[in-house]
Amino acid sequence: MPFWFKCFRLISIIALLFLAFASHGSRSDELTTATPQKINEYADLLHKVIYDWNYPSALSNEAIEQQIIKSGVQQDESSIGVIFRHLMALSTAETGEHARVPVYVKQPLLNKHWQVLEKTAPKTYAYTHGYYIYVQAANDYKGSSRRVDSTIPELIGLKEKLLRIGDKEAVAIASMWLAMEYSESAPLRAISEIEYALPHLPDDSANNALESELGITTALSWLSSKYMELNIPSKSYEYVAQLIEIKRKKGTLKAWDYSYAVIALLSLNQYSNAMTLAEEAKSMSLNDTPLQGYIARALELAVLIKQYDGENSDLIIGLAKELSNYHVDSVPVHFADIKPYAKAVSLAFSSDTKNFNIAIDEYKKVMQEQESTITFSRQIGLKKYPALRDIYYLKGDMQKAFLYEKKYKEVLIAYNTEQFNLSDRLETSSLSEDIELAQYKQRELKALLDEKAGLTSNLEQLQLTIFALVVTIFCILAMWLWLTKKQNASSSQFDSLTGTLTRRAMLNSLKKALKRDSSSCVALLDIDNFKRINEKFGHEVGDEVLATFSQTIRGRIRKSDKLCRYGNEEFLIYFTDSNERHVKRVLDELNQSLSKLTLWKHTNERFAVSFSSGVLKVNGDANLDTVIQCCDKLLQTAKQKGHSQIETYALSVC
């Protein structure tokens, strides 16, 4: 370790110790006044401000304002009061013409305030600090997704801090905030964070509404949504089925909870099961609010449209007209498209072309409004084009139906390609990102200096605080530069086109894994007729096939499994703790998923790809060269039998 770095680290530690000593006395006094009852009261109030203010719900703005006045949060000068006052004010700081929460900030929010909440209620601290990071950056970047350049590093820091504290539920809540921000840039990371948090998340019986907001049911809903975006409906249905079962046991199941389940089953062509769930949602909504009945009928209409065979048009028309005339007060923006969609469906069977086109324009207008008002709006395109495709299919206009099917495929590919590209960019830090992070920290420091009139500490303590912050910023910059160097050094382990491990990195990893694992499988995959694809469509299309092929595999295998690009069109997968039957099922599902991908970005020709594979079951330590030779032998046997073939054996037969 260089001498300058040792000195730098020593100065940082001394500065932080001075800061901790200076503020210790005031924090210990604060801890006695930050009672769990007061924290839970403020947390429940903040939950209403975030989720009910300016939103059509059972709780009006006037009712929330009365609760704010009654709570006394505006007059509370304790650290807890300062935190919740700041968060309530920030929640509507950028609302445009909408009403703002009548709470006003009187002093800056400092680290010493957060420390009191962290010591008293770690789970509430995890939610509120995560929300503070998110909403502050959302306001700074005017709603742009560029905010993740600052929120993700800060949320990672929050998670690491909570890991040191040791509260598993608090760490899980921080992971959920991180997953929400990753959903804008790196879908697989988002899924990884949610699945990491899932076993430790609080349920609906948490101490306050904030702690349970990012709980088990939210995690299951997000996982179902993310897997549908990645076009893996079987995994989506797996998680939403768990969500439905949990809510059924708790008696909180609503019609809208069936949405992803029905969509996933329709994607899997399981129309009968989808209709069963739609009817169950409809029966549950009979004694519920009109909104739930509205959603249940929309699910039933979606299933009927997918089952359309030219004979059930009367059922579709009748239900579509019912939805068009259905009266619901204050429909949330997420469901505002149901009524114009139903109207367009009902007119699709008529000869009234003029009103049909008007209905289509109205539906498109509502979808545009959703894109401009919903925070995570990229999924709107994934919903809009299939809906237009189905409407024109009902009308019998196959040309436009095919046009919107093509647009849907393009949006799906572009959506996931963009996310994976952003994911790669986040993995390798750049100097510009380091500078932007430093500037963001310096803006916070400037804001602290501008608000110094509100500080209660003396000038000496203020100087110590500023010095410690500056040292901390330089420490962060040094750490980021070190991580960048480390990441650049390890970049040679990954294939630049597919993002998978290189052959050398995979073989080095397998040498250790085969000694460690008692039971595993190795599969060698080869894309069928890949040479013909290159010759017919060009290498640009061939590269797209390879990239799409690897993304599809990574989206299906487990985090513990390993994938590498072994040759030009050959891929090697190592399945930990697996048998031949499990691996064959995974490979069959991958072939089935690939068979549905027929539209490609760099050619107008439609074609699907498949692969053949040789799977070897390995029990305990084995010679790596022998394993690879056996896999290659099995692969050649599979290819001799035709396309999409799988040969599986144990090592002893080779």
Image (tube, helix red, strand yellow):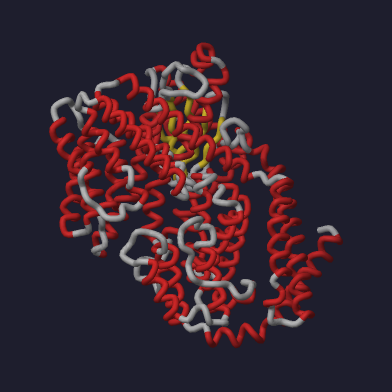
Q: How many marks?
A: 0
Q: Is residue 4 above or below residue 618?
A: below
Along the line of sight, the residue nearer the viewer: 160 or 491: 160
Q: Is residue 325 left or right of residue 483?
A: left
Residue closest to the far top: 536
Image height check: is 590 above or below 206? above
Which residue, as the protein is rendered here, is positioned at the far right? 3
Query: Can I make out residue 619 in this image?
Result: no
- Residue beneath the point at 38% across and 31% down: 593
Q: Give whichever of 323, 406 is nearer the camera.
A: 323
Q: Quadrant of the C terminus?
A: top left
In the depicted view, which residue is nearer to us: 364 or 412?
364
User: Relative to 446, does residue 190 appear above or below in the rendering?
Assistant: above
Image quarter in which the N terminus is found: bottom right
* Image coords of residue 496 (percent x, y): 62, 32
Residue 163 in view of the camera = yes
56 or 514: nearer the eye?
Answer: 56
Give the residue drawn at x 49%, y 70%: 102
Q: Position of residue 521 (x, y in %)?
A: 45, 39
Q: Position of residue 15 (x, y in %)?
A: 77, 73
Query: What residue is shown at x 45% (from left), y 20% (from top)?
Result: 528
Residue 407 as seen in the image, left or right of residue 112: left
Q: Residue at x 58, y 41 (%)?
A: 422
Q: Quadrant of residue 200?
A: bottom left
Where does residue 634 sit, x and y in percent of width and height? 44, 26
